[in-house]
Image (cartoon, rainbow, N blue to C red):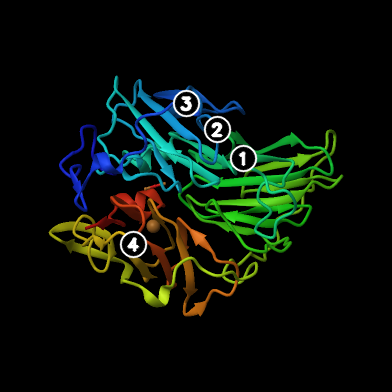
Amino acid sequence: DYGGGPGASSSEHDHHGGKSVVDLTGPRAGTPDVALTLTAREQRFTLATGQSVDGYTLNGTSPGPLIRAVQGDLVEVTLVNESVADGATLHWHGIDVPNAEDGVAGVTQDAVPVGGKHVYRFRAEQAGTYWYHSHQVSSEQVRNGLFGTIVISPRAAPAGPSAQGSRGTEDRDLVAAIHTYDDRRTINGRTGSSREDVAAGTRLRVRIVNTDNALVRTGLVGAPVKVLAVDGQDLNGPTPTTDAFPLAAGARVDLDVTIPPTGVRLEAGGGSLALAPPGVEAPADPLPSATVDLLSYGSPAPLALDPAKADRAFEYRIGRRPGFLDGVPGLWWTINGHKFPDVPMYMVTEGDVVTMTISNSSGQSHPMHLHGHHAVVLSRNGVKSTGTPWWVDTLEVGDKETYEIAFTADNPGLWMDHCHNLPHASEGLMTHLMYE
Ligand code: C2O
Ligand code: CU
């Protein structure tokens, strides 16, 4: 629920595709491998670098705690709302959880009111870099702090170096959550330039998470990297690059770097993080102007689905229109000419292979996010993907661009499909994928 307050309607809860919500929940029984309580508060708080922010915290901080799980773990998170007046939820951005665990107020649950709690339980099936955030009045709550990161490590590291993205071969990893509080760009809640000592020769997996509303050009300066994963999905045959990475709002990228004696610096437009041996200043160079293009990056590999045999082919045309639309005056983002909630839902049957053509003539760029599924990018502006299969949950669709994507409808329920520039979602740029 983007606009509403607490106690959003629960009328949509009951039936999705002939299954009750009970069929679509995570495991209710069993001892969790990872269990924690996140207490949400509306409060004035202080960033690690000293500036104060009027916003929200989870367990007293923003970002909230980094959650770590191993693939296969049963994760149990209890959200307690101590003082968030509008109510709050937790959405597991990029993790394809069972529908009832998706944390969308007004769709999969009611917002948790002050004094209430809600228990989320799911199996961490997909290794990768993810994040969580409130999905109640999201544009306001996420911007002001109700979010954190979650890392799911592979069950077992492969024995030797792997051609499949070298997952699990790093010496250590590090999460860098980019967020702007008021006008202050931060990395892990620190403004300006911060640093972390990392010994020369360390093979580091840097997990960059963009929790902002706009795309961030990011990357490491000082050493070549390999792009290991995007949106939690491994890339195939990544090659070394020094190009910057265009990270969509809500998206994640994992970079593989071996720290040189001179260190590296993570640059995130106004915030930076030095990763260098003790006493060493990281390089000050700016990001290069060249940008990694995932359409041609890495080496091709067979797809697990056949888009030529799609059961459904959808159009998702993004536009913008002033005036009265569906009876309401304003300047509205539109999908196929309508604004939410008058956009017809995309209906699928479990098992369908779905293609979707997302085109944008709205005058602005939109990071489009599909809940509960990952989609593979087939083409951009008619140019077919020739690189590694590029799987996304959040895809930046620039003005005048057209992307063709495909996914398998393998996670029954009612799912949001919206722009992750969250004010745009509250201005109508959202719809649902629904299983019949
Ligand atoms: Cu990260 Cu519907 O959102
Ligand atoms: Cu948008």
Of callouts 4 and 2, the N-terminal one: 2
Q: Is residue 385 above or below residue 432?
A: below
Q: Nearer the viewer, mark 1 or mark 3?
A: 3
Q: Position of residue 307 (x, y in %)?
A: 42, 73
Residue that lies at the very extreme toward the bottom in this rendered image = 382
Which residue bears the numbered disc 4? Answer: 351
Q: Secondary structure at mark 4?
A: loop
Q: Secondary structure at mark 1?
A: strand
Of callouts 1 and 4, the N-terminal one: 1
Q: Is residue 272 above or below residue 80?
A: below
Q: Secondary structure at mark 2?
A: loop
For residue 109, which numbered disc appears in the image? none
For residue 66, which numbered disc appears in the image? 2
Instruction: For the residues labelled 1 and 2, say whether their Cβ atoms are less than 8 Å apart.
Output: yes
**Cβ of disc 1 within 8 Å of ligand 1?**
no
Of callouts 3 and 2, the N-terminal one: 3
